[in-house]
Image (cartoon, rainbow, N blue to C red):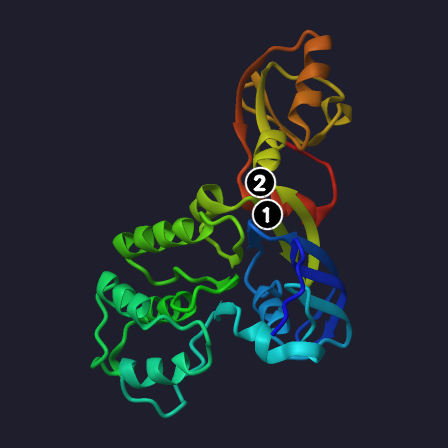
Amino acid sequence: MQYVETSKAISIKGLRKSLDQMDIGPIDLEIESGYIVAIVGPNGAGKSTLFRLLMNLIKPDAGEIQLLGQTYIENEISIKQRIGYIPETEEWMDAGFSTIKELTQFVSHWYLGWNESKAQELFARFGLDGKQKLRHLSKGMKRKLAFIHAMAFDPDILFLDEPTSGLDPFAWRMMMEDLMAYMERGDKTVLLATHIIDEVKRMADYVAFIHDGKLMGFYEKDVLFDSWKTLWIEGHHDQLIELSGVVAVEELSPATATKVISRSSRETEADLHRLGVKVIQTQSVELDEILGYLISGEIRKVG
C-alpha cells in the first residue's frame, strides 16, 4: 500500500450526525502528526460518538473525515491497520471468546504490524496472563487489555476514550509512561478523551472542548492555562466586568477583595495596573470551569 504523505493526521470537515439523543456537529478540526489532543467535555457531550465516527463504526450524515491523508471510502482496511482504538466500553464481551489469549490471537490477525514480543512484554508489565478468563476481569484489567491490544502493533494514531478509567494509581502511572514513550518518535498522534485533569496537564499539547455535540473551542494547552486566570484584587471596584478579557467578577466578603476571572489575563492585569488596582494573587482556571464559561458564552457578575 502506498501511503499519502501528509502532516495532517486527522482532518475533519463539516462533520454532522443526527442521533436520537443529540445532533453532532458541524465539526471542523485539523490535527497535525506528532501531537496529543485532549477532548474535554461533560458526560453525554458527544465524545464517544465522535470516536465512533472517526472509526467509521457509524456513518456521518455529512462532511468528510481524512485520517493519515486517506478516507474510508478509499482505504478503510489500511486506515484501521494504522489506528489503535480504546472505546469507552469493551465491545468484545459478547464475542464468544473465553480467555485473554483467545481474544488476543483474534485481534492480532487484524494488524500487519502486530508485534507479539511487544504484546507479551506489555502483558508482563501490566500483570495480565493469557489464561485469565475474560468474564473474571475487573474494569481496570479490561482497560489494561484494551491498551495492550492498541499498542502492540505500533499504530500511527491512537484514539483513546477514557483509557485509564478504573486503573489503580500504579497502573495509571505506567500507562502514562508508555504513552509518553510512544510519542517520543515525533510522528505519532493521540486523540484522548478524559475526565482526569492531571492527564490533560501532563500530556496534552492541545485541548478541544466539546459540549452538546459541538466543538466549543480548540486551544494550545500552555497558552490556554497562561491566558485563563483567576485574579484576586484588593477592594471592590465598579465596572471590572468591562475590562479586557474579564468573564466573571465576584465580590468577596468581607469587602476587602474581589475575584476576577479572565480569559486574557495579561490584558486584564494591564488594565488593572492602569487603574492603580493591586493584584494580590493569580491562579490558572481549571478546565471544567473554562468549559463552563465557553458553554454559557456570557460574562457574569456574582455576588
The reply to whether residue 57 is in sight is no
| Residue 58 x/y as whole percent | 64, 79
Q: Quadrant of residue 133?
A: bottom left
Q: Is residue 116 left or right of residue 188?
A: left
Q: Nearer the viewer, residue 231 or 194?
A: 194
| Amino acid of disc 1 | Val
Tell me which residue sits at (58%, 66%) in the image: 44
- Real-space Cα separation, disc 1 to disc 2, in angstroms: 6 Å
Q: Is residue 185 above or below residue 157?
A: above
Query: Where is 257 relative to 182, above or below?
Result: above
Q: Amino acid at mark 2?
A: Lys
The mark found on residue 207 in the picture is 1
Work out which quarter of the rendered image holds the N terminus and state it.
bottom right
Q: Is residue 272 above or below residue 296?
A: above
Is 185 on the left or on the right of 149, as rendered?
right
**Rendering quarter of residue 212:** bottom right
Mark 2 crowd level (few <14, some 14–19, many ≥20, 10 Å Cα):
many
How many marks the image carries: the answer is 2
Can residue 181 be seen by looking at this rendering?
yes
The location of residue 298, given as percent across then percent down, is 74, 42
Percent across and percent down for residue 284 are 54, 31
Q: Are marks 1 and 2 in contact (CB under 8 Å)?
A: yes
Q: Which residue does the numbered mark 2 point to in the structure image?
A: 221
Q: Earlier in the sequence, mark 1 or mark 2?
A: 1
